[in-house]
């Protein structure tokens, strides 16, 4: 059963990159189907408006609930997971990507402006799995880029999408800490040599060196990921 993804957005063109490379191949292989829907197709006024002023005052505009209700109703099933990208959400992570990769149907609601009227989440929460997810502690102009990131991180974990599943084993955020540094030809580049151990053919020594490098890198870049932190 392929993973089905429906993306609802006012900027469908943001998702053209999903036709390229690994994501494009995943769709051609039938492992994943991705459909992009323009929210404005679900408006009913002449101006195809999707936002209005916030109750309670404040700057910016809020996306009105009805177009979202119409758009989500057009694709939702009882197997759907509705994902709302928002800086206020739970943190998206590799384990969450793995969960999404094994879902049946994902609906991404890409909000703009100051966000989507909260009643959209409140309406669907009793009916289906609803997840407000953040890709990190920063604010974007909309949920589209976050959706691209979450789709790519999840789809690459769908069995069969990656040619060599081996490459999933060692990558960062799978093992405790981050990945060791990588090198390829030439052996010397602008006076810089590849670490000798990597050319030695001693697989035990290479594994030990890589584990050490992972710890050094994790300590320097992501001490929060160190065991026991
Ligand atoms: C409008 O959406 C965002 O700004 C957003 C969404 C998901 N993660 C973030 N860190 C920001």
Image (tube, helix red, strand yellow):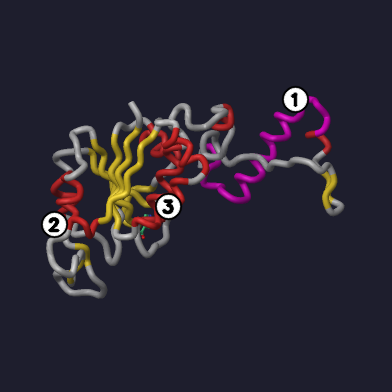
Q: Quadrant of ligand 1?
A: bottom left
Q: Residue at x 64, y 45 (%)?
A: 217
SS class of the residue under badge 1? helix
Q: Which mark is residue 41?
A: none
Which residue corresponds to mark 2? 66
State the image coordinates of residue 28 (x, y, percent, origin top left): 44, 35
Tell which of 46 and 67 is nearer to you: 46
Per the rendered image, the range of residues in magenta is: 199-227
The span from disc 3 to disc 2 (Cα, nearest Å) is: 26 Å
The span from disc 1 to disc 2 (Cα, nearest Å) is: 60 Å
Which residue corresponds to mark 3? 16
Label 3: few (<14), some or many (≥20) within 10 Å? Answer: few
19 lies left or right of 89: right
229 lies left or right of 210: left
Secondary structure mostly seen in the magenta stretch? helix
Counting residues from the start of the chain, the first of labels 1 and 3 encountered is 3
Which residue corresponds to mark 1? 203
């Amino acid at each position: 059963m392929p993973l089905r993804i429906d993306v609802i957005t006012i900027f469908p063109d943001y998702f053209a990159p999903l036709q390229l490379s690994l994501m494009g191949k995943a769709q051609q292989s039938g492992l994943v189907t991705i459909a992009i829907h323009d929210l404005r197709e679900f408006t009913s006024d002449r101006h195809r408006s999707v936002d209005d002023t916030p109750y309670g005052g404040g700057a910016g505009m809020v996306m009105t609930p009805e177009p979202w209700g119409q758009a989500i109703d057009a694709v939702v099933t009882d197997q759907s997971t509705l994902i709302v990208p928002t800086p206020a959400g739970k943190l998206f992570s590799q384990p969450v990507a793995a969960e999404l990769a094994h879902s049946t149907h994902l609906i991404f609601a890409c909000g703009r402006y100051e966000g989507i009227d909260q009643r959209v989440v409140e309406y669907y929460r009793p009916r289906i799995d609803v997840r407000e997810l953040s890709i990190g502690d920063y604010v974007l102009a909309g949920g589209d880029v976050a959706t691209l990131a979450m789709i790519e991180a999840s789809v690459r974990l769908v069995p069969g999408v990656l040619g060599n599943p081996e490459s999933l084993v060692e990558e960062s955020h799978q093992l405790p800490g981050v990945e060791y540094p990588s090198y390829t030809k030439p052996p010397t580049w602008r006076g810089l040599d590849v670490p000798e151990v990597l050319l030695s053919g001693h697989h035990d020594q290479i594994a030990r060196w890589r584990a050490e490098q992972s710890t050094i890198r994790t300590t320097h870049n992501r001490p929060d990921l160190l065991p026991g932190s």
